[in-house]
Image (cartoon, rainbow, N blue to C red):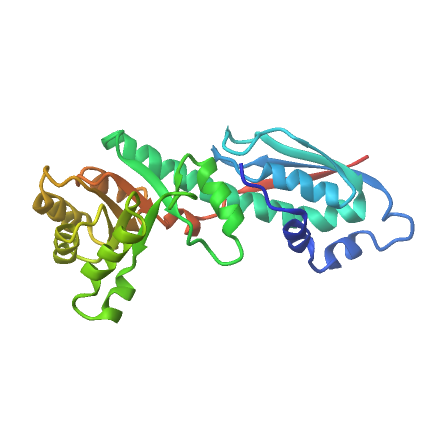
Amino acid sequence: MLLLDDTALACLLKRDGAVAAAAFSASGRRARMVSVALRARGSGIVCGTEEAARMFALLGCAADTAIASGTRAEPGALLIAARGPAEALVGGAQAVQTLLEWASGVADCAARILRATRAVDPAVAVACPRKAIPGARPLALKAVAAGGAAIYPALGAETALVLSDCRALGGRAAPGERIAGLRQAAPDGRVTVEVRDGDEALAAARLGADRLLLARMAPDAVAATMRALGPGWPGEALAAGPITEGAAPAYAQSGVHALVSSAPYHALPAEIDVAFEPG
């Protein structure tokens, strides 16, 4: 699975050392060895324990990972334990906790959306866009993959995307000309057109789009569009937007082939307990 490099992890560890300084201001206590254990407060999919172990290593601490990313943890389950100099361990534990909580929240949200979708139609795929939160993209992509979702678009996919925001730049004939140009440039590739309503979807389908990205359309509008396209349309349709666990079933039964949800990136963090012990 994707991992953050040492430079990115070191940046996460750069924080005010006031907590450690206040706790270990007495002479000789900074070198004292302590242990820390991070445990899940609730159940859910875990993500980021590999990065957490590496963060502790960068601080000069030894760490043992108890649960790998993509694994479900039950309340009270040990995620990771570490031992090292008190100042380093206390100074870095909060950054490690924050990473684990955010990544695990994203992963578990993706997993819940996937379960809600498959409960209605196991054939409908669930993916999350590469357009993730700025500065958190590598961890975000790892987290959604840990939750079982695919990443859209996949790297290396022979697909050209025509964005709805850009179609008007060439005038009324732009969509057809754009699709034709892409066909000439890559005859074996697939052309995806982003649309915002049923009329745009039908027009793009008539122009030869292989895939329709139905952006931020309500479930009933998506279902109506799929009925209008009809079972004879040879292409693929994907419902895209901040599709939540609650909305996923309605989209899954609309007739689309996949959901592309950005909702996991805005999920509530998981709750993780941190406990220190001397020695």
Q: How many marks?
A: 0
268 or 135: nearer the viewer: 135
The image quadrant that residue 40 belongs to is: top right
Q: Is residue 23 left or right of residue 221?
A: right
Q: Position of residue 62 (x, y in %)?
A: 76, 35
Q: Residue at x 16, y 68 (%)?
A: 172
Seen as rendered, the residue at the extreme right is 28
250 or 279: nearer the viewer: 250
Q: Position of residue 38 (x, y in %)?
A: 63, 37
Q: Residue at x 37, y 50 (%)?
A: 262
Q: Position of residue 153 (x, y in %)?
A: 37, 46
Task: Quarter of the image for the C terminus: give it.
Answer: top right
63 or 188: nearer the viewer: 188
Q: Residue at x 17, y 50 (%)?
A: 208
271 or 218: nearer the viewer: 218
Q: Position of residue 252 (x, y in %)?
A: 23, 38
Residue 105 visible, this orientation: no
Residue 177 visible, this orientation: yes
The image quadrant that residue 200 belongs to is: bottom left
